[in-house]
């Protein structure tokens, strides 16, 4: 398809006449004409770039010719509206061209190569980044959505304009959502509130965030939105006199001190009020910052002068002052916030900022194009966005699949900041509830992987300590340390969670490969061979049959229990038509020795707590490896013990490590009895992990200890020592059913 067919005037007039037919006057009032759009572009773009945008419009109009939106209007009106939104952000002309063409690859037969030839590689990459993955089969809508969003977010790391186009696209779709079915309205609104509004907030584009939240709220919870809107309208009427009084007082105070500034009343938007009511489980009347005022001045030092003025004018509420100028938010937002007790005892919020801060607050990263602020200071939205995009790339590398990646992105989009300091005085903003481990990973993934302790304000703390504003944290690392799976129970930031999971996944894969090779060789021992001496053609044929890419993948599958070593051996030895000659009577596979160092692919059953020296057996647990039980464990009878599911194992003579086991001690009720027992256990070199006390008859008490022991002999020494205590009447090892 050529860029333009026929005269441009004929094409444009045809599109305009087609778009007008069947539309009501209110609908027409919301539509933009290309002539108006080009006139608007003339205010900030050179004429040759405006002509390129017009050419892109004509190309998009021809490509979408005959296509209509759900509302019945010609499809080209949507790209035109998206381009208009971006033009209001003063975006460059290539971004506007991509806006006109953003659905062409997805909804028409135009190829990316053709678009690149006509409009440049830069534009083609932008359009491809916004386009969904429609040509891939997914098992569910959620998986398809996650994969498309993952593609878009990764494209955004190469060019931030991708997400700006997508935000404008979503904003216009939300403005015209009434044409969709109720089910589609709720689904799109939920996605908007969960993903796109938080992204707009993360990039500091406040006006886009607010409109997306208001539209999403209205379509997802229409009844709640109407009730809250009515309550707000009523409150405005009741407090209008108070609002006027405060505004007049603020303006008079500025004039008296000869401070040039603007005073504007502001009202919290409905979704913000609703979120505060829901998060704090409070009523509408309890939300104190529904009404507020914004004071905009020329310089930073004037902001602090105004703060003193308003605190003299009305009493401040203790604990409600926030200095976002000294410590900006994660998206670059800066201002002074204070809550005052106004007339009639009504609390009002005052925001004080400079004109530059106001522009950043509304436009965020778009201010880079809108006002050419430039600079790479720590508080510049462009630099802060670059840091966030770098975190996205790290999460992408560690994510298992698109759905997992998207879930972690959602976590990262709702920070609720806590501000802490590094030992060198650098400020870090973390999600509220963040722990020492979250801080360590925020510094660097290697610091997080190797952290062992931390100092908060020079005091030693545990790694799960929750951070508070203003603390100074120093991380202590040790070589050879690796992440603990238990950290996943308390970390809250997406970066920490993804790094821990990624590291453990790689460790687990290596352990699974090593263990799988041992399992396979244990089976091959019965046939007096091993994997190294098998014909490579047999292995290659088996890998091709099973669609595995390498022998390590086969080891990994066996180690995780997804394939049974015995069945793999039977197939390997029968390839090329050979027979495996053996019977159940004469085939005795080599017992696998459990060393205790196999890692996460060998799990020890909690019901019977096997320890070195016990007779043991093992069951395959697909996806996790094997679970080792004591041979006499009663739970084995209820498991799937079909042939091939159970593995013949034994403890290695040099088994290493400490293993949990449980004992029950019946002891007479005496003061200090527990301390006596604990001391005796410690004498034998064992650590008590947990203890539970249950009184029996008023005379005796059952103490259940979970101990760490090295072997059955070690446990026997502990029990012999405990029997020497006169108060103890009975000791048994616990096996839970």
Image: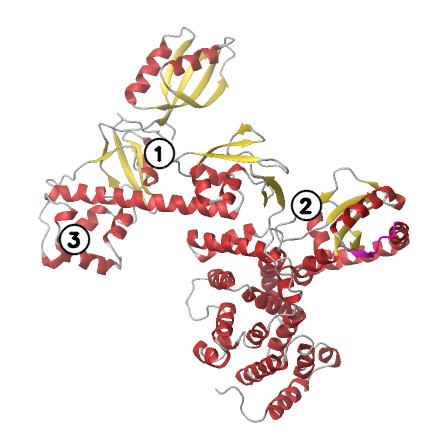
**Are discs 2 and 1 less than 8 Å apart at CB?**
no
Q: Secondary structure at mark 3?
A: helix
Give, as a single range, the part of the protein colored magenta.
257-269
Name the residue tied to disc 3: 572
Place of residue 694 in the rendered image (x, y in percent of width and height, measured from the top left) = 49, 19
Q: Is residue 268 magenta?
A: yes
Look at the image and tell me whether residue 70 can be seen: no
**Are discs 1 and 3 less than 8 Å apart at CB?**
no
Relative to 340, is 668 above or below? above
In this rendering, which labeled residue sits more in front, label 2 or label 1? 2
Q: Residues within 10 Å of mark 3 (few under 14, many from 20)?
A: many
Closer to the camera, 356 or 39? Answer: 356
In this rendering, which labeled residue sits more in front, label 1 or label 3? 3
Q: Secondary structure at mark 1?
A: loop
Q: Is residue 271 magenta?
A: no
Name the residue tied to disc 2: 326
Place of residue 288 in the rendered image (x, y in percent of width and height, measured from the top left) = 78, 46
Look at the image and tell me whether residue 454 can be seen: yes
* Cα distance between the residues tagged 2 and 1: 54 Å
Q: Residues within 10 Å of mark 2 (few under 14, many from 20)?
A: few
Place of residue 342 in the rendered image (x, y in percent of width and height, measured from the top left) = 86, 45
Place of residue 97 in the rendered image (x, y in percent of width and height, measured from the top left) = 57, 76
* Cα distance between the residues tagged 2 and 3: 68 Å
Name the residue tied to disc 1: 605
Relative to 685, is 535 above or below? below
Q: Secondary structure at mark 2?
A: loop
């Amino acid at each position: 398809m050529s860029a333009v067919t026929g005269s441009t005037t004929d094409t444009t007039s045809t599109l305009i006449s087609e778009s007008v037919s069947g539309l009501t006057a209110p609908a027409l009032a919301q539509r933009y004409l290309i002539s108006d759009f080009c006139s608007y572009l003339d205010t900030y773009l050179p004429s040759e770039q405006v002509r390129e945008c017009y050419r892109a419009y004509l190309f998009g109009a021809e490509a979408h010719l005959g296509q209509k939106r759900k509302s019945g209007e010609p499809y080209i009106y949507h790209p035109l509206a998206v381009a208009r939104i971006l033009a209001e952000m003063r975006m460059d002309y290539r971004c506007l061209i991509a806006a006109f063409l953003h659905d062409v690859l997805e909804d028409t037969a135009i190829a990316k190569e053709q678009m690149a030839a006509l409009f440049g590689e830069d534009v083609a990459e932008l359009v491809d980044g916004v386009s969904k993955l429609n040509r891939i089969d997914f098992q569910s809508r959620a998986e398809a959505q996650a994969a498309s969003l993952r593609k878009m977010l990764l494209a955004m790391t190469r060019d931030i304009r991708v997400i700006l186009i997508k935000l404008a696209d979503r904003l216009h779709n939300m403005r015209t959502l009434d044409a969709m079915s109720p089910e589609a309205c709720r689904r799109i609104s939920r996605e908007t509130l969960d993903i796109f509004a938080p992204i707009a907030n993360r990039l500091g584009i406040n006006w886009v965030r607010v409109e997306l939240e208001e539209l999403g709220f209205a379509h997802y919870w229409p009844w709640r939105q109407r009730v809250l809107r009515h309550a707000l309208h009523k409150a405005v009427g009741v407090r209008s006199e108070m609002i006027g009084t405060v505004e007049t007082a603020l303006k008079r105070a500025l004039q008296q001190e000869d401070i040039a500034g603007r005073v504007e009343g502001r009202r919290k938007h409905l979704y913000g009020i609703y979120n505060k009511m829901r998060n704090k489980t409070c009523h509408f009347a309890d939300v104190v910052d529904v009404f507020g005022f914004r004071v905009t001045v020329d310089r930073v030092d004037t902001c602090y002068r105004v703060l003193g003025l308003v605190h003299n004018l009305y009493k401040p509420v203790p604990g409600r002052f926030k200095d976002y100028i000294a410590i900006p938010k994660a998206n670059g937002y800066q201002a002074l916030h204070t809550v005052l007790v106004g007339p009639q005892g009504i609390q009002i919020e005052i925001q004080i900022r400079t004109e530059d801060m106001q522009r950043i607050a509304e436009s965020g990263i778009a201010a880079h194009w809108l006002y050419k602020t430039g600079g790479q200071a720590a508080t510049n939205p462009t630099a802060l966005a670059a840091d966030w995009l770098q975190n996205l790339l790290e999460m992408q590398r560690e994510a298992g699949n698109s759905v997992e990646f998207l879930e972690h992105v959602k976590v990262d989009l709702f920070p609720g900041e806590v501000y802490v300091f590094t030992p060198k005085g650098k400020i870090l903003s973390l999600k509220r509830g963040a722990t020492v481990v979250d801080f360590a990973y925020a510094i660097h993934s290697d610091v997080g992987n190797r952290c062992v302790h931390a100092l908060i304000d020079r005091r030693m703390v545990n790694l799960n300590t929750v951070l508070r504003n203003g603390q100074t944290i120093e991380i202590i690392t040790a070589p050879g340390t690796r992440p603990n799976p238990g950290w996943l129970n308390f970390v809250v930031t997406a970066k920490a969670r993804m790094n821990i999971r990624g590291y453990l996944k790689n460790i687990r894969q290596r352990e699974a490969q090593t263990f799988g090779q041992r399992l396979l060789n244990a089976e091959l021992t019965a046939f007096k061979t091993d994997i190294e001496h098998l014909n490579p053609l047999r292995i290659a044929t088996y890998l091709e049959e099973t669609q595995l890419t390498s022998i390590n993948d086969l080891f990994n599958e066996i180690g995780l229990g997804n394939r049974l070593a015995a069945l793999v051996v039977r197939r390997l030895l029968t390839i090329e038509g050979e027979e495996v000659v053996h019977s159940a009577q004469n085939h005795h596979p080599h017992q696998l020795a459990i060393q205790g160092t196999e890692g996460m692919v060998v799990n020890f059953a909690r019901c019977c707590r096997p320890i070195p020296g016990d007779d043991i057996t093992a069951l395959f647990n697909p996806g996790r490896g094997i679970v080792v039980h004591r041979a006499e464990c009663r739970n084995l009878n209820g498991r799937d013990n079909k042939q091939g599911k159970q593995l013949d194992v034994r403890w290695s003579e040099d088994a290493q490590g400490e293993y949990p086991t449980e004992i029950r001690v019946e002891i007479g009720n005496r003061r200090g009895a527990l301390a006596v027992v604990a001391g005796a256990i410690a004498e034998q070199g064992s650590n008590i992990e947990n203890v539970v006390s249950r009184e029996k008859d008023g005379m005796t008490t059952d103490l259940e200890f979970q101990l760490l022991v090295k072997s059955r002999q070690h446990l026997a020494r502990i029990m012999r020592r405990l029997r020497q205590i006169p108060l103890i009447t009975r000791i048994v090892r616990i096996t839970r059913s």
